[in-house]
Image (cartoon, rainbow, N blue to C red):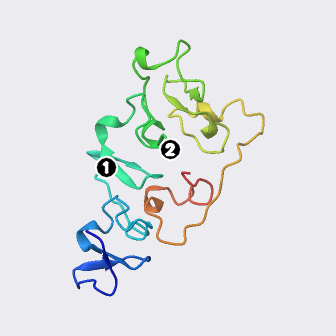
């Protein structure tokens, strides 16, 4: 139930568009305000033993989706840095999908992560045979706390945005 401000109760969040939603709806992963303000600046903490974090979507999924051969996160982060090959039925005939690079151990990573100066494959094969070329990565600046910032290595924060 959405009400117009100033009728908001002390137990409600005031949206940027002056709607009121229960505080339980704040940072729950749904755009209850219809302007995104109840989800802006939320920090998401996943249990790394049982969950995988989707950086682009800012939510957690069960660990069972990690490396299952299907992009469950919109940015494909649940399929990045997988060790070992996916089951043959999930792979194309040559090992990985067209948009992927096959590491020396059979794992598949996104092609955009090759030759970027960061070893994404366990064996570092994504950085071999680069001939001095580096992939151009998109940079971004967070104007609110970045929920995935702590998940990045400090040396990576200036080089990789996760988007």
- Image quarter of residue 114: top right
First in sequence: mark 2 vs mark 1: 1
Q: Nearer the viewer, residue 142 or 132?
A: 142
Q: Which mark is residue 75?
A: 2
Q: Nearer the viewer, residue 68 or 102?
A: 68
At x 28% / y 66%, what residue is drawn? 25
Front label number (2 vs 1): 2
Residue 44, percent across and down? Answer: 35, 60
Placement of 26 over or under 54, stated as above or below: below
Which quadrant of the rendered structure holds the N terminus?
A: bottom left
* SS at mark 2 in the image: loop
* SS at mark 1 in the image: loop
- From the image, tell me which residue sits under label 1: 48
Give how far apart the Cα atoms at labels 2 and 1 are.
18 Å
How crowded pointer 1 is (Cα within 10 Å; few <14, some 14-19, many 20+) is rated as few
Q: Nearer the viewer, residue 131 or 150?
A: 150
At x 42% / y 71%, what residue is drawn? 37
Residue 69, percent across and down? Answer: 42, 28
């Amino acid at each position: 139930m959405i009400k117009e401000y100033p009728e908001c109760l002390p137990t409600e969040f005031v949206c940027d568009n002056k709607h009121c939603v229960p505080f339980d709806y704040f940072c729950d992963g749904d755009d209850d305000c219809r302007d995104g303000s109840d989800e802006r600046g939320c920090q998401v903490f996943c249990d790394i033993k049982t969950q995988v974090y989707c950086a682009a979507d800012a939510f957690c999924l069960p660990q069972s989706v990690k490396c299952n051969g299907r992009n469950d996160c919109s940015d494909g982060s649940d399929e990045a840095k997988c060790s070992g090959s996916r089951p043959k039925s999930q792979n194309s005939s040559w090992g990985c999908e067209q948009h992927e690079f096959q590491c020396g151990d059979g794992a598949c990573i996104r092609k955009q992560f090759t030759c970027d100066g960061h070893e994404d494959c366990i064996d570092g094969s994504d950085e071999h045979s680069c001939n001095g070329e580096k992939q151009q990565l998109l940079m971004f600046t967070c104007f609110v706390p970045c929920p995935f910032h702590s998940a990045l290595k400090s040396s990576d924060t200036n080089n990789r945005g996760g988007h």
